Image (tube, rainbow, N blue to C red):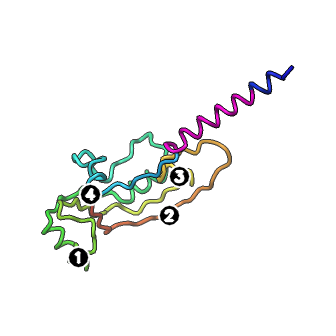
Amino acid sequence: MPDRSSFSKTLRTACATLAAALFASTLNAAPKPLGDAELSAVRGADGSILAGLQTPSSNAQNGLANGLAAAFSSSAGSTLLNPAQFAAALEAAGLSPSMFPDYAGQPVAQTVVDAKPVTFSFNLSDVLLSTTGLQYAGGASMGTITMKDFDARGTTIWVWQHH
């Protein structure tokens, strides 16, 4: 008499292999790169994304984000420049709009940093959170870095919406 358990196991394996073969072409589909028009339509094309320096909330625990926000702040806030004003600001800095291939003549927010030098410490896990959004919560420490008297005064930050 044949062993039914081995037949059943063989049948299940065959069905699983057949299902995997049927769906393999859809599971391994090659990604399709998006064109400029598609990328513009994905997010922010409606002006809903506003780039700028935001003051972190008082309960934020990310030392890197808090320290950089403090270092790159401006008491005057941002100024909105039209394309001619932006070109003039670039020229004064020894640059030209042609050096920025993604700039297409849109208004530019200009922020001139005037914050006092700041000292701040952050864990390397803060870098992971700030750059990837991944939270490292546990295990051994990844290390701590302290920036002493970090001075960004005089830095000009230009931000424009990419279309």
Q: Secondary structure at mark 3?
A: helix
The residue that mark 2 highlights is 148
**Distance of mark 2 from mark 4, alpha carbons?**
35 Å
Quarter of the image where one finds residue 81? bottom left
Question: Which is more foreground, mark 1 or mark 4?
Answer: 4
Instruction: Tell me where the magenta segment starts and ends, as one range.
Output: 9-27
Residue 104 on the magenta segment = no
Q: Is residue 143 left or right of residue 94?
A: right
26 vs 130, nearest the viewer? 26
Question: Which is more foreground, mark 3 or mark 2?
Answer: 3
Q: Tell me which numbered mark, 1 or 2, is placed earlier along the sequence.
A: 1
Q: Tell me which numbered mark, 1 or 4, is placed earlier along the sequence.
A: 1
27 vs 118, nearest the viewer? 27
Mark number, residue 128: 3
Q: Secondary structure at mark 4?
A: loop
Residue 3 location in percent, x, y? 84, 23
Mark number, residue 23: none
32 vs 133, nearest the viewer? 32
The C terminus - image quarter? bottom left
Q: Tell me which numbered mark, 2 or 4, is placed earlier along the sequence.
A: 2
Q: Amino acid at mark 4?
A: His
**Distance of mark 3 from mark 2, alpha carbons?**
21 Å
Residues tagged 2 and 4 counted as in contact (Cβ below 8 A): no
Q: Secondary structure at mark 1?
A: loop
Residue at the image point whose x is 31% and y is 69% from the top: 154
**Distance of mark 1 from mark 3, alpha carbons?**
34 Å
Label 2: few (<14), some (14–19) or many (≥20) C-alpha neighbours in 10 Å: few
The residue that mark 4 highlights is 162
Question: Which is more foreground, mark 1 or mark 2?
Answer: 1
Q: Amino acid at mark 3?
A: Leu
Residue at the image point whose x is 25% and y is 80% from the top: 94
